[in-house]
Image (cartoon, rainbow, N blue to C red):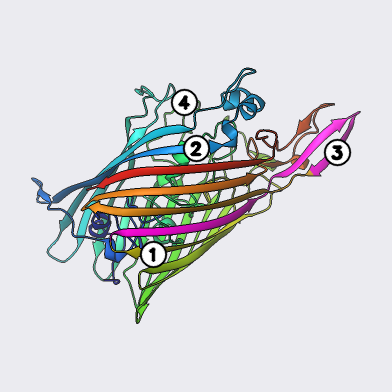
Amino acid sequence: MRKILLGTTAVAGAALLAPAAFAQAPVTTAPGSLAGNNQVGTQGVTAPSPAIAAASGLAVRIGGYFDFSAAMIYDDWDQARSRIQGGAANGGAPNAQRRSRYDFRNDLELYIFVDGRAANGMTYGANFEFQMDNMGGANVAGSNGSGSGVDLDEAWGYIAFPNLGTLQFGQQDNAASQLQVRAPSAGLVGTDGDWYDFIVTAGLFSGAYIASGINDGNDATKVIYLSPQFAGFDFGLSYAQNSYEGERQDQPTSTLAQQRDRTSLENEMSAALRYRGTFGPVGVNAGLGGMWANSGALTATGAPTGNLRGQNVTAYTAGLTFSAYGFAVGGEYTFGQYNGSSVGRSALNPGLDDSYHWVVGATYTMGPLLIGANFAQGEQDNGIQSSTTGGVTTYRSLADRKHTIWGIGAVYTLAPGLALYAIYQNVNDENIPTGAPSNARYLAAPANGATAGTTLASFDGSNTRTINVGMLGIRLAF
């Protein structure tokens, strides 16, 4: 069961169609699963549904999921005082009141798998992933902003040979993301889980978490190679020329960056090595991954960024899990030259130090019930702020952003394809910047009485944002 050729649509399709995919040891990625951080174990993979024969002779299958959840949210950024201090950026005004603590949520995606097999054993096809919760908005053509618009999340083709591996091409996760090994967790409880959908981040820099997995390459158009498994080992490589899809050449700069304007990451490469094996009753899953990219070289007007150009992006991750007798334990460590909530997607401004985080987790499976917990901490550099008083400019180093998060959760398989879940997530986030951190020594001295560089947010009179989220939900996977 563990000698699987990763990257083929047969495996991806099977994982997507698994009822709840309760994993003891995470081994492969499956959007829509409830196994924790979208990781699925082999025991959670079931046979795919019968395919429909297309006119071309190719097999066409459909899968996806529908998820409904209710949540109670207690977030310092929702408080009236925080909204007033955050101003218009946080939807606030002098008479602002706190946000509601309760909400419902829908989440659904549809997947189409097209597969073919040649006489020489070659398999080939394409995957299409549609997410049905696109927020839209005034700047997106044809959008009504209802939150129910259809968005093509991923679209990619593949060619695979049994003993040579798989070549993928299109809008797909990079190799490091596909093969990464993450800490076990249960359901939507996770350091970057779907609890985030209930959290307001307006007026703050880069979201409510920083302990995420290595980024997926922004689903940019890329080329990916995934090897077969040899003695428990497999590896992957990927390359993307630019950060978006190749057709983005005519977008106005007010909405989406024009593809070849060199304002965002380019020449993105990633690589990963993974081992999966069993030793008696113990399953072992270990992985190493990395990604590298050049930061944007030009401004929106085409001028060189000069000494304000961001640092080239690097990100490295390592993960290890063990599973036996229904238990799974493990962890991950990630570090590099990046900041923000998506590892490797935002270039550090000049003069900033590296970021890092670590995660540990454990799960226990007992029949249809999966329970689990995780804990993580991370830090990111907030840079240096300058101020001018009486014509004299002084500089001070700001405290790092320090992020601590933990959660517990449970998933119960009620019927084939139908699962109930409950989670609790706690976040303490210190010293969150309101914009991308910078080192003021690279900036012009501010005017008298003003400051330059990073500005930190205030949460109900404190530098620490505390978030508590409780969720109950039901998910249908098909």
Relative to residue 465, is residue 413 depicted above or below? below
Mark 3 or 1, closer to the camera: 1
Query: Pointers 3 and 1 in contact (CB under 8 A)?
Result: no
Q: CA distance from mark 4 to mark 2?
A: 37 Å
Q: Quadrant of residue 120?
A: bottom left
Identify residue for label 4.
Answer: 252
**As rendered, which of 455 and 281 lies closer to the eye?**
281
Considering only order in the chain, which callout, 3 or 2, is on the residue closer to the N terminus?
A: 2
Please report the bounds of the magenta region as a residue range.
368-396
Amino acid type for the residue under numbered disc 1: Tyr
Q: Earlier in the sequence, mark 1 or mark 2?
A: 2
| Residue type (three-letter) at the residue carrying disc 2 | Ile
- The numbered dot on residue 73 is 2
* Magenta stretch secondary structure, dominant: strand
User: Which badge, 3 or 1, comes first in the chain's sequence?
Assistant: 1
For label 1, the residue is 364
SS class of the residue under badge 3? Answer: strand
Mark 4 or mark 1: whose residue is earlier in sequence: 4
> What is the crowding at mark 2: few (fewer than 14 residues within 10 Å), some, or many (at least 20)?
many
Q: Is residue 287 visible?
A: no
* First in sequence: mark 4 vs mark 3: 4
Residue underneath mark 3: 394
Q: Secondary structure at mark 2?
A: strand
